[in-house]
Amino acid sequence: MLTQIITFLIFVAVIGCILYGRKLIKTEKVDAVFGNPERALGGTHWVIVGSSFLLLVWLYYSWDIAKGFYPKSANELCQVAKVNDSLLGLKYQFPIEEREFKSTSQIKKENKNLNLILNEIQNSQEIDNQQKTVLAGFIKKTNQLIPLLTNEDLIENETKQKINGITGKINLLTENFQKPDYPFETEQELNERLKAVSEEGGWGIVKVQSGTGSIENTMEVPLIPATNKGLKFHAAAQQLNLISDEFFKLRNHNPQFKNQIKKLKDDIKSYRKNLSDSEEVVSTYAKNIVKIARRIEFASIYPPNALDKMQNAIIKFDNAQLKTQGGLRFIDILLFPAGTIVASGPSCSEQGSGRWLPKPSDTFNKFILMSKPSVGYKDIPLLWIDMVDVSKMIGFILPDWIADILPGEYPVHTKDGIVKENFKGNVLKVVTGDFKLFKVPVPYGHIWDSFLRVFLGLVFGIIIGVPLGLFMGLNRFAKGFFDPLIELYRPVPPLAWAPLIISVLGIDNTGKVFLLFMVSLSIMIISARAGASGTQLSKIHAAHSLGASKRQILRHVIFPNSLPEILTGIRVAVGMCWGTLVAAEFLAGTTGIGFVENVAKKYFQYEVIWITIFIMGMLGLLFDITLRKIIDKTIPWRGKG
Amino acid sequence: MSDLISQNLNMIFKTPKGETVHALKDLNFTLKKGELLTVLGPSGCGKTTLLNITAGFIRPTSGIITLNNKEIDGPGVERGMVFQQGALFEWLTVAENVNFGLRMKKEDPIQTAKKVDEWLEIVGLRGFGNTPTYQLSGGMQQRVALARCLINDPDLILMDEPLGALDALTREKMQSLVLKIWKETGKTIILITHSVEEALLLGERLYVMAPRPGRIHKEYNLPFATMGLKEDLREIKKNKDFSTKREEILEMIWNMEEEIMGKDI
C-alpha cells in the first residue's frame, strides 16, 4: 500500500518539478550566458527530481513496484516457472527453442568424439599396428550402433505405443488445462491449500512477528499456489513431471541393438583383460570407446520422424500455457526488469536485480526491526543504552594491585565457615568494582562499538601524533630519529597490518583500536609536522622579542599556527580510520557495523547489507559534518592570515 | 648610559654553494638614548642583518654590540621589534595580540587590560580590542604590531621596513604616528626603510649603507624629524633643504646600484 502511494507521489513530484523547471527556464533572464556559474545556482526542484528518480529506480529494479501493485505476481510466476522447469527436459528434445533435435546433436557429438579417438590412435607412437587395427574395429562397430537406433523400421511396437501414450497424456493435459475449473480441486483441498498459503506467508517481509525469530523466517518467494491461476500451473507442472519422467525412462532399444552393444562391450572387456600392464595406453583407448558406446546407449536417440506427434503436442501445450498466463506475462516483462522468478526443483527464487537489490519496503521494515534493541543483529542491538553501575567503571579504572600492596593479609574463612571482611578485603572489593553505587546510562551496540573504535584510535593517534609531529617539525634529532620509523610503516596499506595486529592483539577492541591508532598516528604526525615547519619565522621572532619562553612559543605560537594543518589531518584521518575499521571488522570480530555486513553476506541477507552500507554512509557523513563545524569554529582565520 | 654601541661588528655568511658573503664589515656606531636612527641603502647592504643582530636573532661573526653596557646575546624584552608584515598572531584578537608579552610574563590581568586600552588609544584603535586580527586592514595591523611592541616598554625599538607594505596615504599617517610615539615615549628607535623620503622625514640621524661588504657609507644628522613633530609632514617635503638632501642621497644610491649591476647604456 505504502509502495503504491510512494510510487504515485514520485510520479507527481517528478512531473510537477519538471514543469516548474521548464517554467523557470522560460522566465529566466536572458543575460545568463552559457558558462556563467550563476546558472548552476538554486535548483531544489531538480534535487527532488534526482532523488525521486533514484528512488524510482530502486523501487523498480528491486521489483517493489511489482510487489506493491501485484503482491500475488511472484507466487504466480513461481508456478509458471515450475511449469517451464518441468517442460524444459521435454522441449529440449525438439527444435522448439533449440536449433536441432536432441538426437541429431547427440549423433553429431558422438561421431566427432569417435573420429577424434580414431585420429589419436592412428597417430600414436606407443601403439603397434596390430592393436591399431583392433581399436579401429571397435570404433567402427560403435559407429554402426547409431543406425540401429535411427532406423524407422527397427523401432519396436511397444516403444511406439509408449510414445503414443505419452503424446496422448500431453494432449489430455492441454485439453484439461484450458478448462476453467482445472485441476478440479475439491472443497476440502481448497481449504487445506488456503490454510497452507496463509501459514506460509507472503513475498518478502510482509508481516513482522514480535520476537527474534521472524527475521530469518521471511520467504523469498512463496511456493504454495495462492490463486486459481497459480494452482492451474502448479497442477500442470506436477503432471508434466510425471510425463517427463515416463519419457526419460523410455529407451529405443530394439533386439538387434541390444545384441550388438552387448557383443561390443564383451569384446572390449575381454580384449582389455588380455592386455599386459605395459599396454596401459591401449587399454585406456578401449575404455574410452566403451564410454562412448554407453553414452549412445543411454541417449534418447530416436528415428527422425518417430516423435513428430509428441513434438506437436508439446508445442500445443506450450502455446496453451502461454495463452493462459495472459496478463501475467506482461507483468513479468514490465515489472520484473533484469531477471525474473525461477524455479529449480521444488523451490522458487528471485533471480536478477530483485535478488541483490532488496525492496525499499522490505529494507525499511527490516531496519525498523533491527533498530529494536530486543532484536538487533546476532542478539546485539545496533545502538542502545545500557544502565551500568558506576562501581563497574571504578573497578575497571583502578588497578587491582592497589589492594595487593596494602599491608596485611586477605581474610581467611573461620572454622565456622564465615568470612569476616577486613580493610584489605574491602579495598579489593572497591578496586574490582564489587560494590553498588548509582547507575548511569552507557550506550552500546554495533554502531556504538564501531564509533568508539574510530574515536579511541583517533584520540590516541592525536595524543601521540601531534606532539611528536610538532617536535619533529622543530628538532633535527627528533626528525632524523623518528622519520625512518614512520616512513617505514606508513606506506604499507593499513589493512596489510590487520592480520598481524589482529592475531597478536586479538579480535576484540584492542587490536582494532591499535590498527586505527597506527592509521591516525602517521597522518597526525605528518600534518602536525607540516604545521610546525610552516610557521613563519617572523612570528617566532616576534614572540621571542616579546619575552616568550621556548615552551610558551610552542604553546602560544607554533601550536595555534599548526592548528589548521592538524585539523585537516584529523579530517583525513577520520576518513581513513572509518574505511580501515570496516575492513578490519570484516576480517575478524564479534561486534561492529562491518561485522554485521560480513555476517549478512554469509547468509545472503541483502537487506542487511544495504542497511549497513546506509548506516556507514550516514556515520561517515556525520563525522565529516561535525569536523567541518569544529574547523569553522576553531580556526576562522584559516587562509586569511 | 643606555646607549647602543657597536664595535667592529662583522657578519660573514656562507652560502650553500660555499661562497662567503660579507654582510657587515667593521661596523662602528653609537646610538644615544632617545635618538631616532633611520637606515637606508640598496638591497643586500646588510640593513636587515644589522637589525637581526641588534634584536639578538643572529650572532655576529666577530665584534661586540652592547645595549646599556650589556652585550646583546639572544632576543630580549628590552629590544622590541616591529616587522614588515606585522607578524601578528592571527588566531588572537587585537587585545590578545597587544597583551601577548605581558601575558607571557604572567602579569596582573587587570593592570594588563588597562595598559592595553591605553595603548590601543595611542595607536588609534580604540574599541577594536575584541576584533580578530585577520579582519584588520594592513595599516591597522601595523598599529597593533606597534602597540604590541610598545606595551612591553622596551628601551630600543627596531623597525624592519614597518611601513613598506602600506599604501601611500596610510603610510603618511603611520609616519606621523611613529614620530608621535617617539616624542611621547622618548624611546630609542632604529627604523629600516627603502624609501629615501621616509628616511629623511623620520630620521634624526640617518645612515646610508653600502653593499659588498655591508658598511656605513655616509652619516647625516637631520632636522626634519624634529620639525615633523610640529609641522605637517607634507610641508616639510616642500622644504628646499629636504629636496636637496633627497636628490643627493638618491644619486648616491643610484651610483651604488650601478657599481653592482653595471651601468645602463
Image (tube, rainbow, N blue to C red):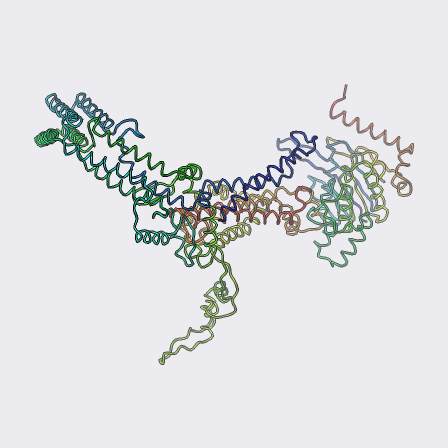
- Image coordinates for residue A321, horizontal then vertical, percent: 33, 37
Location of residue B124 in the rendering, given as x and y in whole percent from the top left corner: 82, 47
Quick check: can you spot residue A84?
yes
Q: Is residue B134 left or right of A452 when viewed as pictured?
A: right
Whether A444 is drawn above or below B7: the answer is below
Q: Relative to A433, is A205 above or below? A: above
User: Residue A468 in the image: x percent, y percent?
Assistant: 56, 48
Quadrant the C terminus of chain A occupies = top right
Query: Quadrant location of residue B165?
Result: top right
Q: Height in image: B64 above or below A32? A: below
Left or right of A28 on screen, residue A614: left
Q: Which residue corresponds to the image point at 78% horizontal and 53% vertical from the top-left? A: B116
The quadrant where residue B175 appears: top right
Q: Nearer the viewer, residue A532 or A22?
A: A22
Of all residues shown, which one is farthest toward the bottom? Answer: A416
A629 is higher (above) or lower (below) than A403:
above
Report the number of numbered marks: 0
Relative to A307, B203 lies left or right: right
Between A184 and A21, the one lying in front of the other is: A184
Q: Nearer the viewer, residue A629 or B136?
A: A629
Q: Is residue A275 visible?
A: no
Q: Whole-percent x and y of residue B14?
A: 65, 34
